[in-house]
Amino acid sequence: MILVTGGAGYIGSHNVLALIEAGYEVVIFDSLEIGHVEFVETLKNIQAKGKVVDFIKGDLQNLSQIKSVFEKYKIDAVVHFAAYSQVAESVKNPQKYYYNNVYGTLNLLNAMLENDVKRIVFSSTAATYGEPVYVPIDEKHPQTPINTYGKTKLMIESIMDDYDNAYGLKSVRLRYFNVAGADSQSRIGEWHDPETHLIPNILKSTFGQGRVFQMFGDDYDTKDGTCVRDYINVEDLALAHVLALKYLENGGETNYFNLGTQNGNSVKEVFSCCEKVTGQNIPVEICPRRQGDPAVLIADNNKAQDVLNWMPQKSLEESVCSSYNWESKLEKIIN
Ligand code: UFG
């Protein structure tokens, strides 16, 4: 049985789907503060080799809630997504982030150790690298996060190293670049409130109601003046978690991998791709730079290819397409 924390959120839910399709039985633990009960219902009803055995609503900051999951089920490994992830908010309210992300993870690890569960796949981030010293960024790149969100994830990575040394807890930390797209059958997708991410924000401007996409800065030192990012499809990303889990099951040591495509796309390129996919002229306004945005972030993903045998398959256009299908459905759900 695999415990997935944050399994009702955007990345977590796509991972639950990949896990059940790979034949795993899954228990979802989620506070539903950010996650959606609708995703849980959808996942429970999907016919696959594996299944969602249970959903438990709970908060990792409450030690007894997470401990009770391990009392109820014999958990073999954990895939840990539950976290706050908004960069700007993390800088304004660090207390919220340290308590939820770091203290919440300490509680999870406490419950794992108490029940002799020694394998965890952890959702980390490229934000642990901070301002890039070189690109593409490999795993040896210095980790000097420039915001509290990135710091919480780096702290957890370092706690996991100490817990391996002391208690033999094996972890795989997956450092995501920019996650994009949705389930190719539009059963689940990206659903944040407020939405801060590029692709959903561009696509939302195609649905009228006076919405205009705000492009944050066109004076960066890049090919067209806008920021360059590495957009990794959420289904490709989910498969990497399944491979990471199998790596640990096969006795793999604690390790960490970048998850990206090794391709950089500028904000303007993503915007053009959205116009092409939707066939619309999307209203856009050039705005000042958003604070804390590095000009270029691109992953070197060779280590994940070599060790996990992972190879992302989906193009930016495929991610935009699945996002658009999902956004069209979401518009009907929320309006
Ligand atoms: N952007 C806009 N307009 C928007 C939203 C974004 O122009 O409405 C621009 C941003 O300024 C940036 C690019 O689009 O240049 C990508 O922005 P996102 O917010 O989509 O993604 P980020 O690169 O800021 O952040 C993502 C995750 C973080 C993670 C980070 C690590 O959201 O959680 O990648 O690289 F920390």
Image (spheres, helix red, strand yellow):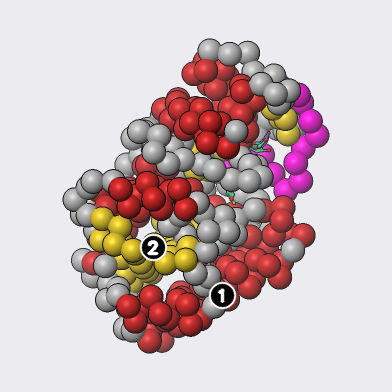
Instruction: From this view, report whether residue 26 is shown above or below residue 132.
Output: below
User: Residue 294 magenta-drawn?
Assistant: yes
Mark 1: few, some, or many residues within 10 Å (few <14, many ≥20)? Answer: some
> Is the magenta region chiefly helix, strand or loop?
loop
Residue where numbered disc 1 is placed: 61
User: In which quadrant is the N terminus drawn?
Assistant: bottom left
* In this picture, residue 62 sits left or right of residue 110: right
Rendering quarter of residue 66 = bottom left
Q: What amino acid type is highlighted by mark number 1?
A: Gln
* In this picture, residue 170 sits left or right of residue 288: left
Q: Position of residue 67 (x, y in %)?
A: 42, 81
Q: What amino acid type is highlighted by mark number 2?
A: Phe
User: In which quadrant is the C terminus drawn?
Assistant: top right
Cβ of mark 2 under 8 Å from ligand 1: the answer is: no
Q: Position of residue 292 (x, y in %)?
A: 72, 48
Q: Nearer the viewer, residue 89 or 299?
A: 89
Badge 2 marks a residue whose secondary structure is: strand
Q: Is residue 254 visible?
A: no
Residue where numbered disc 2 is placed: 55
Q: Position of residue 306 (x, y in %)?
A: 30, 50
Name which residue lies at 23% across and 70% down: 251
- Tag shown at residue 146: none
Q: Position of residue 42 (x, y in %)?
A: 37, 46
Q: Do callouts 2 and 1 mark residues in contact (Cβ within 8 Å)?
A: no
* In this picture, residue 333 sits left or right of residue 216: left
Name which residue lies at 55% across and 22% down: 274
Q: Which residues are magenta?
A: 284-297
Q: Is residue 77 visible?
A: yes
Query: Ligand 1: which quarter?
Result: top right
